[in-house]
Amino acid sequence: MIRFWRQAPLPLLLLILGYGFWVSPDFKEIAAGVALFLFGMLSLEKGFKAFTGGTLEQVLRASTNRLWKSIAFGITSTTLMQSSTLVSLVTISFVSAEMITLAAGIGVIMGANLGTTTGAWLIAGLGLRVDIAGYAMPALVVGVILLLQRSKVLQGIGYLALGVGFLFLGIHYMKEGFEAFQGAFDLSGYVIPGILGVLLYTGIGMLITVIMQSSHATLLVIITALATGQISYDSALALAIGANLGSAITTAIGGMTANLGGKRLAIAHVLFNVMTATVAIVFIGQMAWAVDHLGALIGLADDEYLLKLALFHTLFNLLGVILLAPFTGVLERALIKYVNPAPKSREKPLYLYPGALETPATAISALRKEVGHLYDNAHDLIAHGVSLRRSVIDSEQSLADAVKNTRRIIPLDVDDVYEAKIKSLHSDIIAFISEIQGRELSQQSVEQLYDLQQASRDIVEAVKATKHLQKNLSRHGLSANPLIRERYDVIRLQIARVLREIRQLRTQDPETVTRLSLDAIKLSVQKSGRSFTADLNELIRGRRLSSSIATSMMNDENYAFEICSNLIEASHALLLPPTRAEQSAEGQLALNEQDIARMAGGNSNPRTRTHTDENEKTAG
């Protein structure tokens, strides 16, 4: 809602406002009313965001596992917040972070459209019938007092009170401005009959909503203008349809900065509102007739045009929900099938986008998935680095046979793939983490950020070690000397097994993965390394291998150890419970480095390695 005003050219805005103030002094009251109303909505958004550190996210997850619950959540949350923008923004964040399904997001959007209609009822039924400015003053006083408190919860309530107060003041000044404006200029004389008038006023309503980035504010303008006789009832109906269309455009603009899931949801919102508006325009006469009869049933007088407008707004949105709800699954499948990312030469984040920063939960969830995306890229690169296809790693095929039967070393420019698939993505992850750290976070969130940042670094280090290993592997991996080839096969097999075992853990139910699962892999790597070193020492003593080629193999086995260790460490952040309490409970059962080293058959000290100088690294 507010993003448009922040990004719009300031001189242009000031010029338009200055011209309006000069043309009509009464315009000042109308503009002040709109400004106060928008500021009230901004305060409401800020107030509700104070409670999104966990409560809103938990409620959203629990309330969207069925379509009817998603719709009900959209209605309830928008009714309470009086801001479909905030509800849509949070929903896009959750769909983008894959915390709720696209179908659930569509349900929330449909419910939010219905929830928006409650604003029309409040304005028409209360805002223009009583002197609500008197109620605004106490709300503002209480809000300011609460803002001065140290408690974030009380400050959040304070912003909510301020939001209500400014909303009421905005309605009051809008009403006063239009009443004064009516004496100087009567817009009702410019009514255009027929379908042309309907389309024209629909377009005007859409334009107003796009400019103000708020369908609530547009409805306030429409209802106050109708109340003061500035527009006719028929024109108001068309303007209300346009307000709905405009809200879809604002969501679409915001959705374009989201990832693929957010874009799909934004498209669904546009499709829903366009379909609803089309039905309302085509059958506007019949719907006006239905409003008259329904109004009579609930006791509305024939000239109760304000409440009839609110009823019309609710009716055509409800009709849209009834028409689309049965086809939500079909729409979800169509969007997933046809809305796909364009091919890109450089890897781009799949889950990181500005909207994910709205709450800590969505930011960390998006970050965790992006680190998983980085791991997937590294998995493919490392598999190719040891001359195995990803399909082999992911299959049930014997890895030992696949390694033994290798007929060629897969050509791989590690530097090029690293720049395109790893480094750029890692940079985006670090930049995103920096953005998150600039916001207020709980201690648990700070710790999760650290773990995920370290996991991203571990993945990068694993790829760098692959780069060093691949140089000698391409030279000696298919050596005619069986002793050399067999030792490189041992290195390749160890890496392949770690890739497969971590892949299998990542496909399991997260509840079944524990620290002991990863410790078992780590123990296997330790044992393999000790066995490899002992084997090489025996070959050197028996003069079956030269010390120079053996040293090169030791360095390469050390790179393999770094690859495996870094991948295992990164998997801790991706696979294990995110909360420190759960990790602490598991940590009591987990093995420490000394335990692993002792079980691997060595001394009580953990395995530590140091590289030889650079010339030794590339020896042989």
Image (cartoon, rainbow, N blue to C red):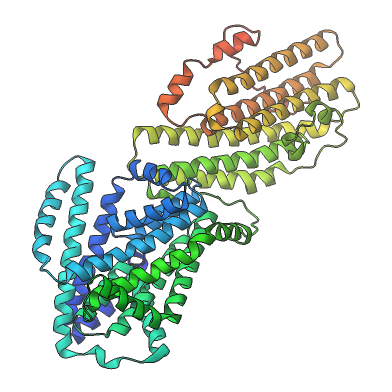
- Does 60 appear above or below 25? above
- Does 532 appear above or below 123? above
Q: Nearer the viewer, residue 346 or 121?
A: 121
**Residue pictured at 78% horizontal, 14% vertical:** 536
Rendered location of residue 16, percent (x, y): 28, 79
The image quarter containing residue 335 is: bottom right
Rendered location of residue 265, percent (x, y): 49, 59
**Residue pictured at 62% horizontal, 62% vertical:** 338
Q: Residue furthest right?
A: 480
Report if residue 289 is visible in the image: yes
| Quadrant showing the C terminus | top right
- Please indicate whether residue 167 sits to the left or right of residue 283 in the image: left
| Quadrant showing the N terminus | bottom left
The image quarter containing residue 23 is: bottom left
The image quarter containing residue 179 is: bottom left
**Residue pictured at 38% horizontal, 54% vertical:** 72
Q: Nearer the viewer, residue 417 or 452?
A: 452
- Please indicate whether residue 86 sits to the left or right of residue 148 in the image: right
- Does 472 appear above or below 304? above
- Does 513 appear above or below 379? above
**Residue pictured at 57% horizontal, 7% vertical:** 604
Report the number of numbered marks. Answer: 0
Q: Residue furthest top?
A: 603
Rendered location of residue 592, percent (x, y): 53, 15
Report if residue 355 is visible in the image: no
Q: Residue furthest front?
A: 297
Rendered location of residue 587, percent (x, y): 47, 19
- Please indicate whether residue 611 sits to the left or right of residue 280 in the image: right
Q: Nearer the viewer, residue 192 or 499?
A: 192
